[in-house]
């Protein structure tokens, strides 16, 4: 079985969903200094930080989590397909 990586949540990011009768809006706010520090600490070898926006199980909060998935081949060779 593959080793489970520790979850990393984005610092300085605040996400909120506003629902209206015509639809919804996902609002995002960034605390710039905290977010820049987070980005610099979590960028991958190609200089990207991949984030997944998720909703809590209760459905009352949204958050961003680092997506550090690498296909097995890429993880072994260090060559990313993207």
Image: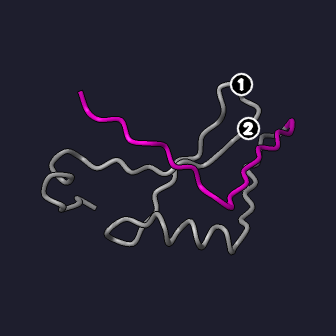
- Residue 66 within the segment the image draws in magenta: no
Label 2: which residue?
A: 61
Q: Main secondary structure of the magenta part?
A: loop
Report the side of 50 relative to 34 (left or right).
left
Pointer 1 with pointer 2, Cβ within 8 A: yes
Question: Along the horizontal axis of the image, is 69 left or right of 40?
Answer: left
> Is 5 or 53 nearer to us in this picture?
5
Please give the residue where the numbered disc 1 appears in the rendered image.
Answer: 58
Position of residue 27 measured from the top left corner of the image (x, y, whole percent): 76, 54
Q: Which type of secondary structure does the marked residue at label 2 adopt? A: loop
Residue 3 pos. (x, y %)? 29, 35
* The magenta segment: 1-21
Q: Is residue 33 above or below residue 78?
A: below
Q: Crowding at label 2, few (<14), some or many (≥20) Cα neighbours within 10 Å?
A: few
Q: Residue at x 73, y 67 (%)?
A: 31
Residue 38 picture location, percent across and down: 56, 65
- Residue 14, located in which quarter of the rendered image? bottom right
Give the side of residue 49 with respect to residue 27, left or right.
left
- In the rendered structure, the answer to whether residue 45 lies left or right of residue 15 reads left
Spatial separation of the CA atoms under disc 1 and disc 2: 8 Å
Q: Residue furthest right?
A: 21
């Amino acid at each position: 079985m593959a080793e489970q990586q520790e979850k990393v949540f984005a610092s300085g990011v605040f996400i909120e969903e506003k629902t209206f009768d015509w639809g919804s809006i996902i609002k995002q706010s960034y605390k710039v200094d905290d977010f820049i520090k987070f980005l610099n600490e979590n960028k991958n070898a190609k200089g990207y930080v991949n984030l997944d926006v998720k909703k809590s199980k209760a459905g009352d909060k949204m958050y961003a989590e680092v997506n550090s998935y690498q296909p097995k081949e890429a993880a072994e060779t260090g060559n990313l397909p993207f």
